[in-house]
Image (cartoon, rainbow, N blue to C red):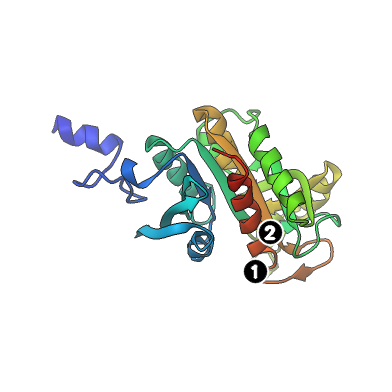
Amino acid sequence: MAGGKRVAEEPKYESGKLYHISLDRKDVGGIALLPGDPDRVQRIAERFSNAKQLASHREYQSYGGYVGNRYVVAMSTGIGGPSAAIAIEELARLGVKTMIRIGTCGSITSKADVGSLVIADAAVRLDGTTDQYVMKGYPAAASYDITNALVEAARSLKKKFVVGATASSDSFYVGQGRKGFNGYYPDSAASLIRSLQSTNVACFEMEASTLFTLGRIYEIRTGAIFAVIANRTTGGFRVDAGVDDAIDTAVLAIRAGIS
């Protein structure tokens, strides 16, 4: 019974693999690239040498391989803060010290059109997950060295990008200022984009605040780069726009020296 209680605190399979991501310490190194979408993981792994699939369980698809001489894991986090927090918690338990989100976003600035990139140096915590960890005023900020490495890689590849804050929401529709089903549109949603624009927030997405907050708590270096697939100021939308550019930028940042 006592042993069962201990396992319940950090659930594992009998093999020792952690319950949600189905990985153990030998599967990972110091760096993880974290897309939300499981289908994006294999695309990232195509940039690795000696890539192999590690696991596929729930929303957590993972591959391992090498970028130069650095062993890197690419693993999906699913949509939103709750599933991202599980991924971060379990990777941290296995010894991962650097985590970079490769995601997509909806821009709310004319400076970041569809197909360009946003490198997030901070996040507005519109999520509920981080409230379970820290007080509301606690900052969600990326690590300077990781952000700088992403910027230098984007410049080297001559990609169009902006650096700025993202707003991480737990809701894709109403929580990002879209109308809900049957036109449901509370006052908070109607004014949200205008309020964020007035404070120079660059975009919406759903996981960065969780990554940045937990990274600061656990002394994990974090960064995030997003492909802009929608622009809420112009109404533009293109599936997959800029995703390969975001992947290439993150991989080059690792190749150039992130450890």
9 relative to 187, above or below: above
Figure quadrant of residue 221: top right
Front position in the image: 180 or 150: 150
Crowding at mark 2 (Cα within 10 Å: few <14, some 14-19, many 20+): many
Q: Is residue 114 visible?
A: yes
Figure quadrant of residue 184: bottom right
Q: Quadrant of the C terminus?
A: top right
Secondary structure at badge 2 equals strand
Identify which residue is drawn at 33% across, 41% down: 25
For the residues labelled 2 and 1, the Cα–Cα distance comes to 8 Å
Q: Tag on residue 227?
A: 2
Crowding at mark 1 (Cα within 10 Å: few <14, some 14-19, many 20+): some
Q: Tell me the amino acid under the disc marked 2.
A: Ala
Q: Is residue 122 visible?
A: no
Q: Which residue is mark 1?
A: 240
Figure quadrant of residue 117: bottom right
Q: Tell me the amino acid under the disc marked 1.
A: Asp
73 relative to 218, above or below: below
Q: Tag on residue 7?
A: none
Residue 62 at x, y percent in the picture: 42, 56
Q: Residue furthest front?
A: 69
Identify which residue is drawn at 53% across, 64% down: 43
Secondary structure at badge 1 equals loop
Residue 67 at x, y percent in the picture: 52, 51
Residue 20 at x, y percent in the picture: 35, 50
Q: Do the numbered discs 2 and 1 sit on residues whose CB atoms are within 8 Å?
A: yes
Q: Is residue 104 left or right of residue 197?
A: left
Q: Quadrant of the N terminus?
A: top left
Ranked by sequence position, the earlier of labels 2 and 1 is 2
Identify which residue is drawn at 49% across, 29% down: 218
